[in-house]
Image (cartoon, rainbow, N blue to C red):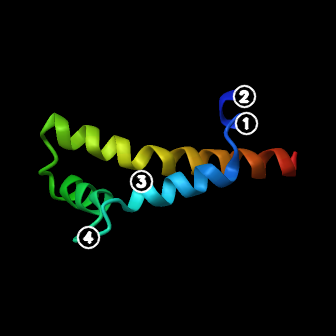
Amino acid sequence: MAFLDSFPLVPLIVLALLLGLAPFVPEPHLFEKVRMLMAGTLVKPLDIFDLIMHASPIVLLVLKLARMAFLKSA
């Protein structure tokens, strides 16, 4: 878990917002890829990679915040 602890929080928030919402116009890729996933049309390897790339900073941020909350309560 030292891997999560090594990430500074503020740059991780900025990265999650920027990469999660990029490109801003016409629609963020993350929203498009999640919509494709729900519709069952996310089948191309490039689309799957794109979903992972845009969602990974958000997943790391959620894991880091959960770990910080767990350590604070313990």
Q: Position of residue 55 (x, y in %)?
A: 40, 49
The Cα–Cα distance between marks 1 and 3, rounded to whole angstroms, is: 21 Å
- Label 2 sits on a secondary structure element that is helix
Along the line of sight, the residue nearer the viewer: 35 or 19: 19
Disc 2 crowd rating (10 Å Cα; few below 14, some 14-19, many 20+) is: few
The Cα–Cα distance between marks 1 and 2, rounded to whole angstroms, is: 5 Å
With respect to residue 36, does 27 lie above or below?
below
Q: Nearer the viewer, mark 4 or mark 2?
A: 4
Disc 4 crowd rating (10 Å Cα; few below 14, some 14-19, many 20+) is: few
- Report the side of 22 relative to 32 (left or right): right
The disc at residue 65 is: none
Query: Mark 4 — residue?
Result: 25
Quarter containing the N terminus: top right
With respect to residue 53, does 36 lie above or below?
below
Q: Nearer the viewer, mark 2 or mark 3?
A: 3
Mark 1–mark 2 CB contact (< 8 Å): yes
Query: Mark 2 — residue?
Result: 2
Query: Mark 1 — residue?
Result: 5
Q: Amino acid at mark 3?
A: Leu
The structure residue drawn at horizontal position 82% and vertical position 44%, both measured from the top left corner, is 71
Query: Mark 3 — residue?
Result: 19
